[in-house]
Image (spheres, rainbow, N blue to C red):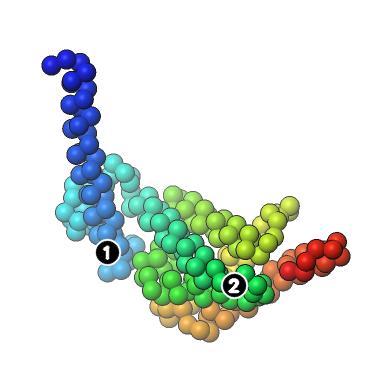
Amino acid sequence: MTVEASENSRRRSRGPIQARSQKRIEAALAAAEKLLVELGPDKTSIPEIAARAEVPRTTIYQYFPDKYALFAHMAESQYGRIAEAIGAATAGAQDADWRELVRIVVDAVADFYDANEVAAILLLLGPFGSADSAAHAKKDKGLADLFRARLGLDAPADTPDRINLAIQIAFACLRWGYLQDGFLSPAIRAEAVRATTAYIAPFVTGKSRTDHSSGGEKS
């Protein structure tokens, strides 16, 4: 066999191996979701996931050194779905007052959590470990940037980032409600809206006055 033929053979052999590993990881992630709901994050483990998914532990460890890295990967995936839910909910609200926009976003996020128990566990009960903390920080920044853009606000020149802090306030309210009731009630949603709008009102209305005095449109 020539060197070129040998190399082509190796490439062909890697294809099925990679495809098999991908299927195993997909099975492991699906098993992890079920175990999170059944057992909770503390009792969910890589060995338990491997047994439920019927895949070798070594395959999972190749991609995720521990369960917290796996949780971080799952949390990032859920954040992407939340961003999509927010985008869909605000698509027809171009002319909405910013306070109404806060309510729309809070309801969209709360509806998503109520319909997706895995997301609620990962994002409202987490973070779990340092890798997961990084995923949550990325999620918070992404949501803040998304909301800031929707409000038509420039990136803040000062610190801390007030819109990011507003996201933290809303999530704190939703987290508290989830821990208390296991779902996000109308009362806790209303409290999340109230607390968030109260915090960012001086920032948003201050920008509105500046825009108005400079001849721009009022927000």
In the picture shown, does residue 212 fall above or below 65? below
Image height check: is 124 above or below 141? below
Q: Measuring from the top left, give residue 69's x and y in whole percent.
A: 37, 50
Residue 125 quadrant: bottom left
Q: Earlier in the sequence, mark 2 or mark 1?
A: 1
For the point 27% across and 65% down, the residue is 34
Q: Which mark is residue 35?
A: 1
- Kindly check if marks 2 and 1 are in contact, taking CB atoms under 8 A apart as contact: no
User: What count of labels does the image hold?
Assistant: 2
134 relative position to 100: left or right: left
- Mark closer to the observer (2, 1): 2
Question: Would residue 124 appear left or right of 94 to someone viewing this image?
Answer: left
Identify which residue is drawn at 47% across, 63% down. 84
Farthest residue to the left: give it.
1
Q: Residues within 10 Å of mark 1 (few under 14, many from 20)?
A: some
Q: Which residue is mark 2?
A: 93
Q: Position of residue 53 (x, y in %)?
A: 20, 56
Looking at the image, the residue that sits furthest to the bottom is 187
Residue 143 horizontal/vertical position (percent): 55, 60
Give the amino acid type for the residue marked by disc 2 in the picture: Ala
Which residue type carries mark 1? Leu
Q: Secondary structure at mark 2?
A: loop
